Image (tube, coloured by chain):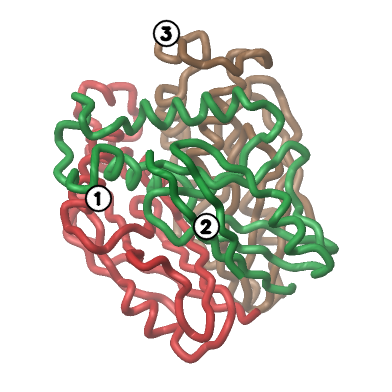
Chain colours: A brown, B red, C green
Amino acid sequence: MDFTIRTSGPGLYEFTHDVADWVRGRGDGLLTLFVRHTSCSLLIQENADPDMKQDLNAFFQKLGPQADHPSMDYLTHTLEGPDDMPAHIKAALLPVSLSIPVRGGRLALGTWHGIYLFEHRSRPHHRTVAAQFTAS
Amino acid sequence: MDFTIRTSGPGLYEFTHDVADWVRGRGDGLLTLFVRHTSCSLLIQENADPDMKQDLNAFFQKLGPQADHPSMDYLTHTLEGPDDMPAHIKAALLPVSLSIPVRGGRLALGTWHGIYLFEHRSRPHHRTVAAQFTAS
Amino acid sequence: MDFTIRTSGPGLYEFTHDVADWVRGRGDGLLTLFVRHTSCSLLIQENADPDMKQDLNAFFQKLGPQADHPSMDYLTHTLEGPDDMPAHIKAALLPVSLSIPVRGGRLALGTWHGIYLFEHRSRPHHRTVAAQFTAS
């Protein structure tokens, strides 16, 4: 099964409820999420405070700024725009897959955990996340 | 099953032996570990030299220093203390879940591999790590 | 089953085809790859453009330079050479395990996805990656 997440610029897009709905009633097992792109990521993080999402995005923008930033003048893969190679860098630093235990049809998340698609590109995208359930 | 790890400040806390004990006798399959918090991480790293643990912790403290450090003046999520948002940042950079093959009831770790809880907060905590075994 | 990948210095070594061959005919399930070392990583990234691989390697060399670089003067674990501790740092920042859904005996990768061993050490190595398939 694939989830589709629409994005409109860098930042975190939560889809915890869609995932929780999909595993409901499945008993015990393992849920795997896998993002089928090289310029966005998956992330589990706090879902209580929107400031946290903004700060997290700001940190990664500073760690891997656009290719036209002086600190990134060594980049050569720039044909697809200044946000492309930094997006690949962030996709290397952040998870491409998540493994979440499922107990009695419920995600064994922490109290404050949300599941996010972390978009690294500037233009709007439709992102596909493959989901797999393995009973244990 | 949940492992509980007590922490007392930033750094690496090994619990390899507890995990090895739990999978013993289970045959072939996949072990998933999943940390149910947003301000600590899991990590597999060398367990031979304590200097390595100290250096690793130092690197991440420099990469994501406390919120009162000049380089972090853009942070807005600071209500829970200067170590809170940097802990979320480190939790994004380091694994929330680990997937370890099990063969004949033994973890297929490398020779020098240890399994760690990586604490990012300053105050003492009890941390919960969910474990799941899926036979293959 | 273990894959062996021969490396000759820092950079990305693709082994997507070996993995695709190994899962062919296995139906639906989950593939886990796990690298049994503490100074190299696994990575899923674009496999279309060699410039991307070079830039990605350059980014991580800047983020965690050799121990004799002035910015790394706080490192104490330097007995095994100037590339050793920075290799552990990169191994903490990049995946030790990958979880890839398999559908009808095919890896559910994205269109441009390649599977890489990311070497962080300078000298040539033989690297071992454990593979596990769990039917779903």
Residue B1, image x, y percentages: 45, 80
Q: Secondary structure at mark 2?
A: strand
In the image, what residue type sits under mark 3? Answer: Pro
**Residue C88 in view here:** yes
Callout 1 and callout 3 share a chain: no
Residue in view at x 76 percent, y 43 percent: A4
Q: Is residue B3 above or below residue C119?
A: below
Q: Residue at image x 58%, y 66%?
A: C2
As drawn, the residue found furthest toward the bottom would be B25
- Tags 2 and 3 both on a single chain: no
Circle 1: residue type = Arg
Q: Give amino acid for label 2.
A: Ser
Contact (CB < 8 A) between labels 2 and 3? no
Measuring from the top left, give residue B70's x and y in whole percent: 21, 21
> Residue placed at 58% from the left, 40% from the top?
A41
* Residue tagged 2: C97
- Total of numbered circles in the picture? 3
Residue at the image point whose x is 34% and y is 28% from the top:
B76
Chain at numbered mark 2? C
**On what subunit does the disc labeled 3 rest?**
A
Mark 1, residue position: B121
Between residues C125 and B41, which one lies in front from this camera angle?
C125
Q: Chain of mark 1?
A: B
Q: Which residue is identified by label 3?
A: A70
